[in-house]
Image: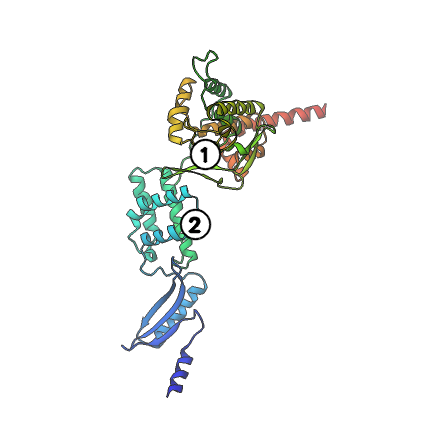
């Protein structure tokens, strides 16, 4: 009898992932098919209940076909909100920067979960997502925030597809929010001179030089980002060779400052310095030596606050940048526009876009060309004029 039972069980056994069929004590037939893992790595099974063995076998065969072609997903009873929490902690946190993680968490908690967090992940449809974007727009949420919300949700659902929890990413079937290109406001060469003159102070000392004069010189000559300037270390500055290396960026997360590596390999770069930028750094080093001794002039941060610590963006803008613009009688631009200023002046002066890309640390030259397309018409005109003169000379 025991042998016969063993034989019957052996006949029912299927290969791994092929599904299991058996009859329940209530008479119904039941089947289970392995279907990937959930966000925590736990193996999932999908269960089927039918009145007859033939019906359950037919349904199991259909689901096996969907599993093979990648359209079988199973999020169980997991809600969108619960899934996003799991994804944020188990996947995103380990793969993005701390500031990006905080940004993702804020978008999820404040904008996604209140609107679609209670929906079943398995039943989330494109219409739900499209309606969320429309509601955000009706509530006057910025286009940039709506675009970020789309990016976070789309990335999280891509992972759900890879984990075989959903058959497709519904974000791919909606119209994503569009963000109008933010107008850049670079300074002219004359305005840059006014800025640097104001930073240098009055020769009579009636208006003292800005302690961060060298920072502004670097900003308009190298296009370094503010975080890169704040994170610059004396060990990465070679005044003899006239260059510096961008190896760190200063980040602020939940009020805490920390040094981090730049986001991309392109951002970790060597930057050549013009002679007057080298002299500005030498002057800054002498001031640091007088204020804090050898340690301030050779170790740690190049640019510090009045107490010798790293700079904070909020303090910098309120105490240095905005007052400087006012003294120079310049428009209230963003600090990032100084980066645009450096790039625009170089391109307008005939510098090759590839050189500008490498200087700015853009990942691709297409980013450089797209960002500074306003300079292209002038560049094209000058290129055509040079070609015309060359051919005219050749013909003559």
Q: Quadrant of the N terminus?
A: bottom left
Residue at horizontal 37 percent and vertical 43 percent from the top: 102
Q: How is the image coloured?
A: rainbow
Q: CA distance from mark 1 to mark 2?
A: 22 Å
Instruction: Name the one closer to the observer, 193 or 284.
Output: 284
Expressed as whole percent of the image width and height from the top left, the position of residue 51 reads 30, 75
Residue 245 appears in which quarter of the rendering?
top right
Residue at horizontal 37 percent and vertical 70 percent from the top: 32
- Whether residue 170 is visible here, answered yes or no, is no
Expressed as whole percent of the image width and height from the top left, the position of residue 173 reads 39, 50
Instruction: Name the one closer to the observer, 255 or 102.
Output: 255
Residue 323 badge: none
* CA neighbours of label 2 inside 10 A, class few (<14), some (14 to 19), many (20+): few
Residue 227 badge: 1
- Whether residue 188 is visible here, answered yes or no, is yes
Q: Quadrant of the C terminus?
A: top right
Give the left or right position of residue 188, taking residue 55 as reference. Answer: right
Give the left or right position of residue 188, taking residue 384 as reference. Answer: left
Expressed as whole percent of the image width and height from the top left, the position of residue 298 reads 52, 30
Expressed as whole percent of the image width and height from the top left, the position of residue 40 reads 38, 58
Q: Which residue is mark 2?
A: 94
372 versus 146 height, above or below: above
* CA neighbours of label 1 inside 10 A, class few (<14), some (14 to 19), many (20+): some
């Amino acid at each position: 009898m025991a042998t016969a039972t063993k034989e019957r069980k052996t006949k029912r056994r299927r290969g791994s992932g092929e599904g299991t069929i058996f009859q329940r004590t209530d008479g119904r037939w039941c089947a289970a098919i392995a279907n990937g893992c959930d966000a925590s790595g736990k193996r999932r099974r999908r269960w089927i209940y039918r009145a007859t063995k033939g019906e359950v076998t037919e349904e199991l065969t259909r689901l096996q076909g969907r599993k093979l072609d990648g359209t079988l997903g199973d999020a169980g009873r997991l809600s969108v909100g619960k899934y996003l929490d799991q994804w944020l902690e188990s996947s995103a946190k380990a793969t993005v920067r701390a500031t990006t993680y905080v940004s993702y968490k804020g978008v999820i908690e404040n904008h996604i979960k209140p609107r679609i967090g209670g929906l079943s992940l398995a039943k989330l449809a494109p219409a739900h997502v499209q309606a969320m974007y429309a509601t955000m727009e009706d509530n006057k949420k910025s286009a940039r925030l709506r675009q970020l919300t789309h990016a976070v949700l789309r990335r999280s659902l891509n992972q759900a597809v890879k984990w075989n929890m959903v058959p497709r990413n519904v974000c791919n079937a909606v119209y994503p929010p569009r963000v109008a290109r933010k107008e850049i406001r670079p300074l002219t060469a004359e305005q840059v001179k006014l800025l640097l003159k104001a930073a240098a102070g009055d020769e009579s000392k009636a208006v003292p030089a800005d302690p961060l004069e060298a920072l502004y010189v670097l900003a308009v000559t190298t296009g370094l980002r503010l975080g890169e300037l704040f994170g610059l270390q004396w060990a990465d500055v070679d005044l003899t060779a006239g260059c510096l290396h961008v190896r760190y960026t200063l980040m602020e997360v939940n009020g805490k400052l920390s040094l981090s590596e730049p986001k991309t390999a392109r951002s970790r770069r060597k930057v050549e310095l013009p002679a007057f930028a080298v002299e500005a750094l030498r002057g800054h080093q002498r001031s640091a030596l007088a204020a804090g001794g050898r340690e301030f002039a050779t170790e740690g941060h190049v640019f510090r606050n009045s107490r010798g610590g790293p700079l904070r963006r909020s303090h910098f803008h309120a105490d240095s940048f905005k007052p400087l613009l006012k003294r120079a009688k310049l428009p209230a631009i963003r600090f990032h526009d100084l980066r645009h200023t450096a790039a625009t002046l170089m391109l307008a002066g005939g510098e090759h876009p590839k050189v500008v890309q490498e200087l700015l640390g853009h990942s691709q030259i297409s980013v450089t060309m797209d960002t500074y397309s306003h300079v292209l018409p002038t560049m094209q005109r000058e290129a055509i004029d040079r070609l015309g003169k060359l051919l005219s000379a050749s013909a003559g």
